[in-house]
Amino acid sequence: MKKTMTIAVDFDGVLNASPFPSVGVLVAGAKQAMEELKAQGHTLIIWTCREGQDQTDAINFLLEREVPFDGINCNTRANKDHFQNDCRKVYADLYIDDKCVGGWQGWKEVMEYITSKERR
């Protein structure tokens, strides 16, 4: 049986290809990858530094393009219950960010990594 994960996905540079604070261009492969991850049962949390109107613009961008997600900058109920708090840091099994060590490799590489992780 596959283990489902909570996955925190950065917005700018990972889902949105437009330069901050603009929105409007999806990163290649982003919608398909998010749909596949959701279909596999993973919980998808949008993990962003955006707030206020910039955050609203990001949410609307995703909703208009029907990119699936379960929350934004929030912990899952299971993690809140387990840790008995709702800390500011979003807890996830995996973080997808364009600012990671080694730089953004693209959605193809991310999906290959997740597939290999699920096999372990």
Image (spheres, rainbow, N blue to C red):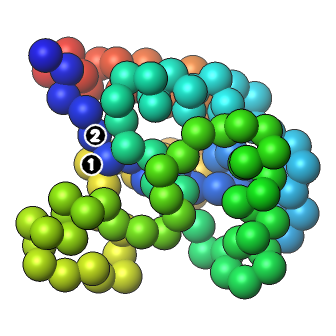
Please state the total of marks drawn on the protein image: 2
In this rendering, the answer to whether 5 lies above or below 86 is: above
- Residue drawn 59% across the image and 39% down it: 68
Circle 1 packing at 10 Å, graded few (<14), some (14-19), many (20+), is: few
Tell me: 111 left or right of 25: left
Residue shown at the point (42%, 69%) measured from the top left: 74
**Residue at (81, 66) in percent of width and height:** 57
- Which residue corresponds to mark 2? 5
**Label 2 secondary element:** loop
Quick check: marks 1 and 2 in contact, CB under 8 Å? yes
Earlier in the chain: of badge 1 and badge 2, it is 2
Q: Amino acid at mark 2?
A: Met
- Where's residue 115, x and y in %? 34, 18
Spot occupied by residue 38 in the image (x, y as percentages of width and height): 46, 31
Looking at the image, can residue 105 be seen?
no
Tell me the quarter of the image containing the N terminus.
Answer: top left
50 vs 112: above or below: below
Between residues 50 and 53, which one lies in front from this camera angle?
53
Q: Is residue 114 visible?
A: yes
Q: Which residue is mark 1?
A: 93
Q: Is residue 76 above or below residue 56?
A: above
Q: Amino acid at mark 1?
A: Asp
Residue 76: x, y in percent?
30, 60
- What percent of the width, then of the height, locates residue 13? 70, 51
Q: Few, some or many C-alpha atoms within 10 Å of disc 2 (few <14, some 14-19, many ≥20)?
A: some
Label 1 – label 2 distance at C-alpha:
6 Å
